[in-house]
Amino acid sequence: MRRRFGRRVVRWGAGWGLLLLTVVAEPCGAANPKSGKDDSTGEALSSAWGAAERRAFRCGLGSIGRRNAEATVRFLASEEMGGRGAGSVEGRIAGRYIVAELERMGYEAGRIAEQQFTGRGGEALRNVLVTVPGRDTVRRVVVGAHFDHEGIKNGVVYPGADDNASGVAVLLELARAARAAEAAGRRPEFTVVLAFWDGEERGLLGSRHYVAELGADTAAVAGYVNFDMVGRNTDQGRPKLCRYFYTADRPELRAWFDESVAAGGLVHLEADYRPCDRTIGGSDNASFARVGVPIVWYHTDGHPDYNRPTDTPDRINYPKLVDIARSAWYVICRLAY
């Protein structure tokens, strides 16, 4: 899908100006967004999908791009956003930004929910959830990234560009892809829930609350895909490297990564495969793994700027971040479509 970009300013609260990218979507065609050739992904997808499924995948793939993703990272990790501490004013503004972007994509208010809960210190927190209804309204695939970070410490802003403005940017691109697939007439088989978690830095609070609220319904979750720190290079000699964690007894999850690279023509991405058991921690995937949900976690690993004021937008590897989003779109299509 080709897009034209404009700019406008909206305001939330006294003195807050927010620069957003306005996306004007054009009709989705059959061309591959990189080659321009018709159905260039057909060879990789023919064994899995029919023509309608292939077209929906291509339309979603073509909607994912750097310009919006980079704008998201630069806004969320700006000095004015004060590190997006859980429960802070800036944290609430981050949540409103996400809702505004989803609405701009065309998600109706009834499909966007703010799941409110209380932090350990009594602070008001909220997850932002958007639903893509499937033909099966019981079974679901959850895809998530946390939007909070460390806030301000001793008067210094911890911007959190990689941790985790990068994950939010990927998740918003996937929301864009799901809307493009809907516009192409393709609903998922399973319902897809795109979850922007609050309170991760305080102990995975948002994802734990969501899982607790599901209760016995966690059995209906077919899989969880997580994005946390997906924008940096842990090894400058291998700038394409991405740690790809997946539930060890689900080998198809590994195969789907390889297929995603071929199907999407992804040239900025290579995997370091990390099969794991159901106790893997470190991010919101742990909340799901603990209750037996198969997981995937895209993660570009630690770096010297982790949880420091130097985790800034200029250090993000944007081509790799975008290819992670494109890879994940394929994996989500295999899980839910």
Image (cartoon, grey):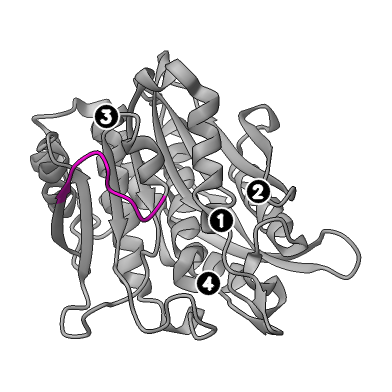
Name the amino acid, label 3: Glu
User: Magenta residues: mostly which secondary structure?
Assistant: loop
Give the image location of residue 65, x and y in percent.
41, 61
| N-terminal label among 4 and 1 | 4
Which secondary structure lies at badge 3?
helix
Q: Disc 2 designates what residue?
A: 120
- Distance in Å between CA atoms under marks 2 and 1: 8 Å
Q: Which mark is residue 160?
A: 4
Q: Disc 3 designates what residue?
A: 53
- Distance in Å between CA atoms under marks 3 and 1: 40 Å
Q: Nearer the viewer, mark 4 or mark 1?
A: 1
Name the amino acid, label 1: Arg
Name the amino acid, label 2: Arg
| N-terminal label among 3 and 4 | 3
Judge from the rendering whether residue 152 lies leftward or rightward of residue 321; answer left or right.
right
The crowd level at tag 3 (other Cα within 10 Å; few <14, some 14-19, many 20+) is many
- Distance in Å between CA atoms under marks 3 and 2: 44 Å
- Look at the numbered discs 2 and 1 and tell me whether their residues touch, using CB distance below 8 Å: yes
Asked whether 270 falls inside the magenta stretch, the response is no
Judge from the rendering whether residue 166 lies leftward or rightward of residue 48; answer left or right.
right
Q: Nearer the viewer, mark 3 or mark 1?
A: 1
- Distance in Å between CA atoms under marks 4 and 1: 15 Å
Span colored in magenta: 275-283
Q: Residue at x 42, y 44 (%)?
A: 177
| N-terminal label among 3 and 1 | 3
Give the image location of residue 168, x and y in percent.
50, 56
